[in-house]
Structure formats: C-alpha cells, structure tokens
Image (spheres, grey):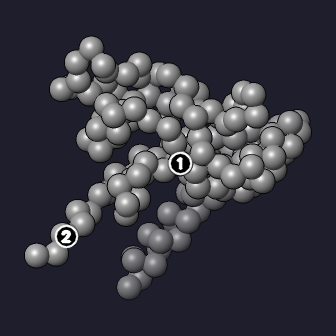
Amino acid sequence: MAKEKTQNKIHIKNKRVSFEYFVIDTYMSGIVLTGTEIKSIREGKASLADSYCVFKNGELFVVGMHIAEYAMGTYNNHDPKRERKLLLTRRELNKLKTKSNEKGFTIVPTELFINDKGLAKVNIALAKGKHFYDKRENLKDKDNKKEIERAKYKYD
C-alpha cells in the first residue's frame, strides 16, 4: 500500500502587512522550531501579529511571533514568544541586511505555513512603511473596487 500524504491546510497570515507596508521583495525561509512548537503550528495555534525580523550576529531572527503552548506538552513545553531563527542562504541574508539598514525599510513575516514535506516555512517580506495618507488611498481603492463589483453584479 502506498502512503498517502495528508493535505496540510495550515496557512497563518499576517493581514496587517498589506495595510501598513509596501512590500518590495519576498523570500521563503525555513524556521528553527522545537517539538512542541511544530505540534502547536499543526493545530493552527500561532499568530504573526506584531512580529518582525532582526539581525543578530549575522543571523536573522523573527521576534514577537506567538506560538501557543502545546496542550499535551509537559515540562518540556516552549516559551510562546521566544525568538526563532530563520534559515536563509548567505546571499539572501547579505542582501536583506544591506536593504534593511536603509532608512524606512524593515523585514516582516507575512505567512507561516507547512509545506508538502511537513516542514514549517515562513514567507518574509522586505517592506517599506506606509504613511497615513497612503493608508487612506489604499482604503479608497478597496472601496472603489467593491463598488465596481457591485455594479457588475447589479446589471448582470
């Protein structure tokens, strides 16, 4: 009998990124986790709200990502808000470090998911912060698109 792969539909998104930042470039990276952390992620108990990435000793870490404690965990359970190392190539790390040192740029995680092999991956984005008037423009564009869609369905 052939082993069937289960469909993992875990996609935890950081919805605030598109509202607060202009996304310049995106990267997919691995993440270093402990046993109880991956179990909590597979249950969908993680949050990327208010998380960001920083460089420490030439390595990239995600700070502020909350992964809830595993319910069946014992004294080996993890700290929910600990810093987690991201796995990228040296070339990508150097590129991100030079860009993030420029004024206005930051690195934020946009999505946490489990790939086909069962490994946890994080999509990170090099982003530039929006000003208040940029956010208002974004909201106006969304409202205009909704109005156009309503008009299409109204006359169909």
Residue 87 picture location, percent across and down: 60, 45
Q: Which residue is mark 1?
A: 30
Tell me, for residue 65, which label it has, or none.
Answer: none
| Local crowd size for mark 2, using a 10 Å CA cut-off: few (<14), some (14–19), many (≥20) | few
Q: Quadrant of the C terminus?
A: bottom left
**Separation of residues labelled 2 and 1 (CA atoms):** 24 Å
Secondary element type, mark 1? strand
Residue wearing tag 2: 4
Check the image and report above or below for 55 versus 4: above
Q: Amino acid at mark 2?
A: Glu
Q: Residue at x 47, y 71 (%)?
A: 149
Percent from the top left, x then y, of residue 126?
72, 48
Near-viewer residue (124 or 70): 70
- The picture places residue 99, in percent across and down from the top left corner, at 84, 45
Location of the N terminus by quadrant is bottom left
Residue found at the very far left of the displayed protein: 1
Residue at the outermost top position: 75
Q: Is residue 148 left or right of 66 when viewed as pictured?
A: right
Q: Residue at x 47, y 22 (%)?
A: 81
